[in-house]
Amino acid sequence: MAKGELHYATLGDVARKIKAREISPLDLVHSMLSRIEAVDSSLKSFATVTPERALAAAEKAEQEIASGNYRGPMHGIPIAVKDLFYTKGIRTMGGLAVFKDFTPDYDGTAVSRLKSAGAILLGKLNLTEGAMAGYHRDFDVPVNPWDPAYWSGASSSGSGVAVAAGLCFAALGTDTGGSIRFPSMANGIVGLKPTYGRVSRYGVHPLGETLDHVGPMTRSVTDAAIVLEAIAGHDINDPTSLKHSAPDMLGHLNNGVAGMRIGYDRAFASEGLNAGLVTAIEDALIVLENLGAAIVDVKMPVDPATIGDTWFAICSREAFNAHAKTFPSRADEYGTHFREFLEIGASITDDQYAAATEVRNTFNKQFKSVLASTDTVICPAGGFTLPLPPDIMYGSTADLQPIFEGVQMHFTIPANFAGTPALTLPCGFSENGIPYAMQLLGPLLSEARLCRIGHAYEKATDWHDRHPTV
């Protein structure tokens, strides 16, 4: 990034300039809209851009700040959200042809809280169909800004691309089996999947009710902390919402990692993986050790085949239930992969779902025990971003097998099963310039601790300061 490229500045830096009235929210929104118009025709991250609404919100923010009514670090910040979040008066399609004409009459809670904090919505971001792995042919596939030949992640792909390319200062994503973490990995940004129930899911198209999480995607750990603090907290409209107030994400962010115990299972974190990725993660461990953390051996209780099969059984059944109003009655309007996924869900019996849930519960006890013995466990955020022919993304489940095999969901599913937080952040690049990422896993409600560790790592490295040339 050359000096003066404001679109790649961090949210925190821009917030300080807005508060000091060195930057006008209106000028900032004009700049971001111009950038979207200039580059997103090739990146395809946005499903809908809302310039009139954004400019009106920017004018309001400018007036409020000028009159001394500064709401906090989100005030005047241009953001975007995955097109899975309900937005009043704006189409919310979820990558689904069956919802192409759906316009909610209210905002989802996370969107509403961002607006209350003063954030400015630029528009809605593309995603895979129904938040699964493939795309419906009526929708664009977002393009990885580091290299168009490479996968841009799933399912919050547009969110990952837009943040990485400097088209917004933060985005919201959802994560059912890795859908915040995979696009963050693929696009070289930070993704935070919070504790289950930490952020309300009210006003979000569901995929798997017991697996879905809402969280921020940003260009720095500090920015993720700022956004999470704005959107977290109990919501009476979501029965799974935790009865906790929003966490203090920033109070201890700079306290470092001295004395912390960081768990690492080398066999789990390296078997069958790209050697460069393994080296990058182990180099990150050395950085943290040099900052005063202790690296300790742990044993992750993960059998890749079992955890994958269990996730597919639970998620497909829950997705089938979630789409009961439109599937199978409008099955012909679904894309190939997602239709096949829902058909699998329809075939899962109550007994099979109960058996899968029992396997999940047994795993969760073992996994949480490992997490309780450390401050965090570090592992890959996924296998590795791989080159893919674009048309494969519209294909069948069989066509998409290279993705499932390549990303290795056994790294991400544990945190969805247990509802525990996970932070993904960049930790290097391959020889051909594709981002590497690591994942910090922690116990329930440990988001502030994970961000503290991630922030310490960022201060000691510069991976998060590198951006694609778009």
Image (cartoon, helix red, strand yellow):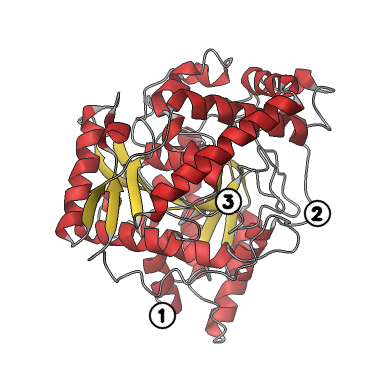
The residue tagged with tag 3: helix, strand or loop? strand
Q: Nearer the viewer, residue 221 or 442?
A: 442
Report the mark closest to the observer, 2 or 3.
3
What residue sits 41% from the left and 80% below the top? Answer: 20
> Please, which residue is most extreme toward the top here?
398
Report x, y in % for residue 184.
42, 43
Report the mark closest to the observer, 1 or 3.
3
Going from N to C along the chain, the mark reached first, 1 or 2, is 1
Q: Is residue 418 left or right of residue 304?
A: right
Report x, y in % for residue 450.
38, 58
> Please, which residue is most extreme toward the left here?
290
Going from N to C along the chain, the mark reached first, 2 or 3, is 2
Report x, y in % for residue 86.
71, 50
Q: Which residue is mark 3?
A: 214
What residue sits 36% from the left and 72% below the top? Answer: 252
Q: Are marks 2 and 3 in contact (CB under 8 Å)?
A: no
Going from N to C along the chain, the mark reached first, 1 or 3, is 1
Distance, label 1 to label 3, CA atoms, is: 31 Å
What residue sits 70% from the left and 24% below the top? Answer: 342
Q: Is residue 81 left or right of residue 20?
A: right
Where's the C terminus, which quadrant?
top left
Distance, label 2 to label 3, CA atoms, is: 20 Å
Question: Against 355, is 392 above or below?
Answer: above
Q: Which residue is mark 2?
A: 105
